[in-house]
Each structure stands twice: as C-alpha cells, then as structure tokens.
Image: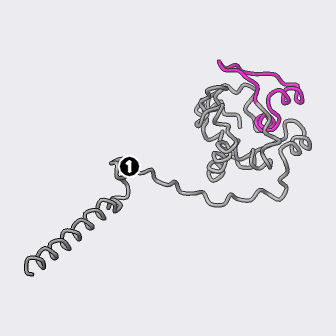
C-alpha cells in the first residue's frame, strides 16, 4: 500500500512538472521585443488618427482645375509639418510610390525629389499634373516638357481617383518635404 501511495504521489508530481514545463514553453517571452524565434518583433507604428477635415470650399480636383485660371492654384499648406504626414499617407495610398519610389527617388518614372522637374515645379503645375496626367496637362496648358530624365513615360490622371483638391495639396506638401536639390532652385 505504501508503495502504491508513493507511486501515486510521484506520478502526480511528475505530471505537475510536465504541465509546468509545457506551459513555460508556450508562454510568451518576457521580452515582448523579441519573438520565440529570437528575431525582433516589428513595432506597431503609431496611427495618425483622423485626418483633418478638408476646408469648406473643397471640391473635386477636376472641378478645381476647371474653375481656376492657369497659374493661380496655390498650395494652402506650404511648410505645414502636419500636412506632410498626411500627404505621405495619400502619396502611398494612391500608389504614387509605385512609379516615383517611396522617397521620391524614381524608378519606373522620373524622380520627384531632385532638381529636374520635367514640367515645372510651381504649385499650379504640380496640382494640374497630378489631376490631369501629363498628356491632358500638355493639351490644356499648351506647355511642354521643361526637363528630361532618363526614365520617361506619361503620368496617369488622378483627378478622378483622388476625392478632393485638398488631398492633392497634401501630396504636394509631402513632395516639397522630400526635395533634395539645391535649396536656391526651390521656386515655391
């Protein structure tokens, strides 16, 4: 009887140790920055929260182009650091990075962070170019390419995809923030 009692107690003890060992293997690491495989766990980026609402006079990009004389479109967010973040979000969200690169360095299409602005760098030109695309921009304005890059291709129109003119201004604000050319050549 004593032997059975001892065997029973040893069995229970062994089972408790086994369960504890298994639980310890499955428990998350005490250091949340390192995963079970020893590699760092990616940190969740802080969300921007809700975007500031567009101004009361916001309209579609194509309406804004139609209702504003050539040369008169001006970016209301010049040097606005908060809008740079929102502009980057819209730039990525509209897949501008697919052609121009995540930091504007180019790729399939011309870079947008250097001094060579193929059609010009003023606010009006950039807004119309994004809204109309390069072919329609040249038709409506009568302007031609001012610069040349190694990679040349027509830019598609985003005026029917981007909901408000305010979103284009946010993108333009982001583009200004990634400019890496000579500061004296920034004409905006």
* Left or right of 130 in this view: 88: left
Circle 1: is it few (<14), some (14-19), or many (20+) Cα within 10 Å?
few
| Quadrant location of the N terminus in the rendered image | bottom left
Which residue is identified by label 1? 40
Q: Which stretch did the figure color magenta?
A: 126-155
Q: Which quadrant is the C terminus positioned in?
A: top right
At mark 1, the secondary structure is loop
Residue drawn at the location 57% of the way across and 57% of the way down? 47
Q: How many marks?
A: 1
The figure's colour scheme reads one colour
Q: Residue at x 63, y 36 (%)?
A: 97
In this rendering, would 27 be left or right of 91? left
Q: Nearer the viewer, residue 13 or 117?
A: 13
| Residue at (34, 48) in percent of width and height | 37
Percent of width and height locating residue 14: 19, 68
Report the residue at 63% width, 53% height from top: 82
Toward which corner of the image does residue 140 lie, by quadrant?
A: top right
Above or below 54: residue 17: below
Decide which of 103, 67 is in the foreground and name it.
103
Residue lying farthest to the left in this orientation: 2
Q: Is residue 66 above or below residue 142?
A: below
Instruction: State the image coordinates of residue 66 (x, y, percent, origin top left).
Output: 91, 41
Q: Does residue 136 belong to the magenta stretch?
A: yes
Specify whether 125 is left or right of 66.
Answer: left
Residue 70, x across and y down, in percent? 87, 36
Magenta run includes residue 81 = no
Front-most of residues 32 and 83: 32
């Amino acid at each position: 009887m004593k032997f059975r009692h001892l065997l029973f107690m040893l069995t229970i003890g062994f089972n408790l140790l086994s369960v504890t060992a298994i639980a310890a293997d499955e428990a998350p690491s005490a250091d949340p920055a390192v995963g079970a495989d020893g590699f760092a766990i990616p940190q969740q980026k802080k969300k921007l929260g809700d975007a500031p609402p567009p101004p009361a006079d916001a309209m579609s990009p194509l309406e804004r182009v139609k209702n504003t004389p050539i040369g008169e479109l001006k970016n209301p967010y010049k040097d606005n650091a908060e809008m740079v973040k929102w502009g980057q979000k819209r730039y990525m969200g509209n897949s501008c990075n697919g052609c121009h690169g995540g930091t504007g360095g180019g790729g399939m299409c011309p870079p947008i962070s250097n001094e060579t602005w193929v059609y010009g760098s003023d606010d009006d030109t950039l807004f119309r170019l994004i809204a109309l695309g390069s072919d329609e921009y040249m038709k409506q304005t009568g302007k031609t390419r001012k610069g040349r890059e190694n990679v040349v291709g027509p830019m598609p129109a985003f005026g029917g995809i981007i909901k408000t003119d305010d979103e284009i201004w946010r993108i333009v604000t982001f583009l200004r923030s990634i400019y890496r050319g000579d500061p004296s050549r920034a004409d905006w």
